[in-house]
Amino acid sequence: MKTEDILTYTALFMAVLLFTMIYASVLIPVLRRYRAGQPILKIGPVWHMSKQGTPTMGGLSFIMALLTVFLLYALLLLRHGEQERLASIVLIILFATLCGAVGFIDDYKKLVKKENQGLSAPQKYFLQLVVAAGFLFTARYLGFVDTAIDVPFTEKSLELGFFYYPLALLFLTGIVNALNLTDGLDGLLSGTVAVLAAFFLLYGSAVGEGTFSLFGVLLLGMSIGFLVFNHHPAKVFMGDTGSLFFGGIVAGVGLMTARPLTVLGMGGVYVIEAASVVLQVLYFKATNGKRLFLMAPLHHHFEKRGLSENAIVCIFAAVAVLCGALMLWGG
């Protein structure tokens, strides 16, 4: 990585970190004033009831931070005549922002109804699918993606032809929802995203893929800045607003770089979390009501086993490190 790039990325990291912390410190009292507290599911662990009323939609802080910093970075790219790169970055951020907007609608409906149920699952997925389809076909129309993807641990690409489109939509919506499912404990999603972001940066530097490096830096600043307020006991939750936004960035990077398999590998923690929910449902139906896990997603199973939130976050972060290291080694 060039010295100029190191200085630019360092400045971006510091800026988005500071803006996230500033916006969060301003936003939390506002959310409290308007009683934008998180409703807690009664079927969850009983000790989670103590979290009732903790401000939610805190993801707005790092979304605003990213948009603020990006506007300044965009001027720099335009000055250097990098319009094409700017367009690809804008597309990813727009996709993530629209995902965050779906989350905001969900969070808002929860607050209005005073229940932990906003949009129905079909409504939520339909909106995500519309956003994902718009992103995919815009990226394809502008020539940022084709129907081939890179295969990790090899120097080969896999041509998917027509099957690329349904698989790409499944990847986009799947990653977004996987990160959403992981956001169930104080600091769990923000902590694992920080780990993932670090490996995005390392991987991008190793293979010369600027999109990974840039969004690694931005994700790292946002996640650490938010973790200051989100670690246990959390002063604020990111809500679906934040988790879907994070998911949109991670999924968007995977699609735009033709490396969705690499992103799936690096985000192995999120794949495991999503798989635990699917397996729980399938096992429940196949056995007429028996459960494979004490509770899904998997982090709640460990909670029911008696592990503390901090212990679970540390375990998941360690697994995230292993996943990231594996894909970095095989990159």
Image (cartoon, rainbow, N blue to C red):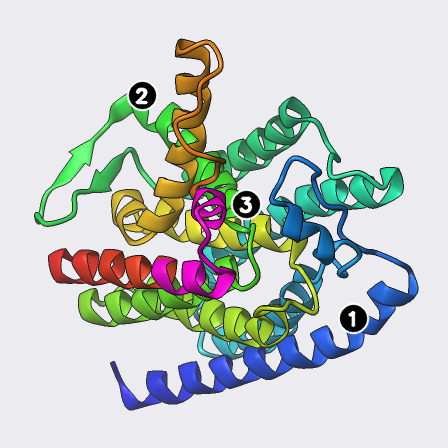
Mark nearer the N terminus (2 vs 1):
1
User: Mark 3, residues whose alpha carbon is within 10 Å: few (<14), some, or many (≥20)?
Assistant: many
Residue that label 1 marks? 27
The CA span between labels 2 and 1 is 45 Å
Three-letter amino acid code at disc 1?
Leu
Residue range (magenta): 299-315
- Estimate the x, y position of residue 212 in percent, counting from the top left: 34, 63
Occupied quadrant, residue 56: bottom right
Three-letter amino acid code at disc 2?
Phe
In-image side of 67 versus 328 (left or right): right
What residue lies at 38% left-to-right and 26% top-to-bottom? 279
Quadrant the N terminus occupies: bottom left
Camera-side mark, 2 or 1: 1
Residue that label 2 marks? 162
Residue 48 painted magenta? no
The CA span between labels 1 and 3 is 21 Å
Q: In the rendered view, tell whether residue 184 sits above or below residue 220.
A: above
